[in-house]
Amino acid sequence: MQNDSNFTFVLFGGTGDLSMRKILPALFEAHRGGMLAEGGKIVAVARAAEDRDAYLDWVNEHVKPHVSKNGVDDAVWKGFLARFVYVRLDLGKPEDFKLLRDAVNELGGTRVFYLATGPSLFVPICRALADVGLNENARIVLEKPLGYDLKSSKAINDAVGEIFAEEQIYRIDHYLGKEPVQNLLALRFGNALFEPLWRREWVESIQITIAEELGVEARGDFYDNTGALRDMVQNHLLQLLSIVTMEPPHSMDSDSVRDEKLRVLRALKPVDPRDISKVAVRGQYHAGVIKGTSVPAYATEKGVRPDSHTETFVALKVEIENWRWAGVPFFLRTGKRLADRTAEIVVNFRPVPHSALGGTALRAGANRLVIRLQPNETIRLYCLAKQPGEGMNLASVHLDLAFDKFFKEGQMEAYQRLLLDVINGRLALFVRRDEQEAAWRYVEPILDEWAASQKPPKPYASGTWGPAAASAMLAQHGTCWLEEEN
Ligand code: BG6
């Protein structure tokens, strides 16, 4: 879809890791797909490159490898490079922002400022933009992490909010841009079939897992001051939970969806610090083997303190205090260096109230919906069926929807969708301030308890599914993680 909205996309942190791996490749894909207005420009802002030529050399060397998996047509690539303007800028020098203002004022269209920088730079950059009048008629994109806790997140939001109105602020949670997450909305609100069952009367428990095989990679320093609760739970997992459990919005406009998500986040049952060991498990990976490859312990990764208590794994039991969900346990889990890379939602429906078919009611593998978000997006409905032949013997079978078989093309990367949404002024997939603060409010007692505790996180060997305590937590509710059934 060719887009008519002309734009000037200003990228702070133009030579950073995120720009290289995600933002510029996503803009390239949008360019290649003809989704960007012809006159749209990318103003890269950095200090490292001397001038535009040097910057383009950097793009050729570092960005091209991330897009070339689909092959790159030379003419298309040249057209992409032609969109670039480069401004060398030292954040500490107000006069450099005047150069930026002059460059931006020469260009037309919607102004987008993307801050692909550390959060400590958000406020100084916003203030410097305001000093040269660049905050008018502009959109600002903030990457996570936005703050370290509720207080620091409020401080950033207050300061940015003095310069930009809420509807100018696009807070990224890239999970919201993922195709399968969009599909969750389609599944829930496009089909009448599931809605009557999507409640406490019929749902026994729900699991949401985001598991990674990767460790902390080159981000040891950042990660060691962050941990899995801040890195994954406060944002991605709680956003997924709110989409799975929200009430049907009245429309898909940005505030209708975000209002419903907020209601869920506000209804999360606060964690009582005395119960912390019953509802929260934290772990840290030790050395191990993942799919045949030996990997080192977290504590020996570059940038990590050898005696670190930072968690690389979290499992939580969450409850939602409203009529739809009261009493249903939600088990959330995420971790690095686990046995497999997967993100999935498992909805366990209640078993039949009386098994007229005799025999032991087969619980495992029936009355269950598994929504696999990645890799290989699939929706799988498990039911019981009669085994062929004599007698009434039941077996677990499943109905499958594999998205790549159904829709052969057209999948869009999360960042591409989100960047197009920013350019086109669509806020629905961005996190509103009140949602973000409600999520911080929920995780904060857990963060505080863990920070105060002298106990280290529970160890787990890389290549496993985390500490045994995470399984014990589910066993208390008569259930287990999906992979433990197989
Ligand atoms: C990021 C986290 O937000 O999400 C990373 O900071 C994590 O630590 C990543 O690896 C996972 O995203 P995805 O899209 O690969 O599941």
Image: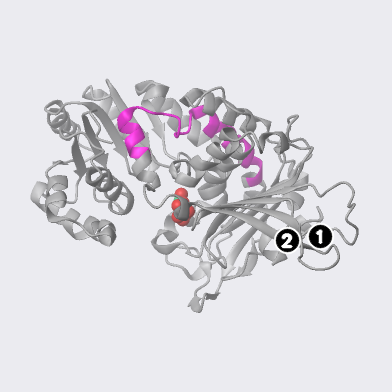
Helix or strand or loop: what does disc 1 sit on?
Answer: loop
| In front of the other: 208 or 203 | 203
Helix or strand or loop: what does disc 2 sit on?
Answer: strand
| In front of the other: 354 or 198 | 354
In-image side of 145 versus 114 (left or right): right
Numbered badge on residue 362: 1
Q: Quadrant of residue 171?
A: top left
In-image side of 320 versus 434 (left or right): right
Label 2 CA crowd tier, 10 Å (few <14, some 14–19, many 20+): some
Q: Quadrant of residue 325?
A: top right
Q: Residue at x 50, y 78 (%)?
A: 294
- Residue 255 image point, x, y percent: 50, 23
Does the image show residue 135? yes
**Above or below, 260 relative to 148:** above
Q: Residue at x 69, y 67 (%)?
A: 486
Q: CA distance from mark 1 to mark 2?
A: 8 Å
Q: Could you tell which of marks 1 and 2 lies nearer the N-terminus?
A: 1
Tell me, yes or no, whether the highlighted magenta stretch contains residue 272.
no
Q: Taken as a whole, is the magenta stretch helix, strand or loop?
A: helix
Amino acid at the residue labelled 1? Leu
Q: Cβ(mark 1) to ligand 1 < 8 Å?
A: no
Numbered badge on residue 396: 2
Does the image show residue 148? no
- Residue 230 image point, x, y percent: 54, 47
| In front of the other: 227 or 295 | 295
In this picture, which residue range is highlighted in magenta? 418-446
- Residue 7 image point, x, y percent: 22, 30
The chosen color scheme is: one colour
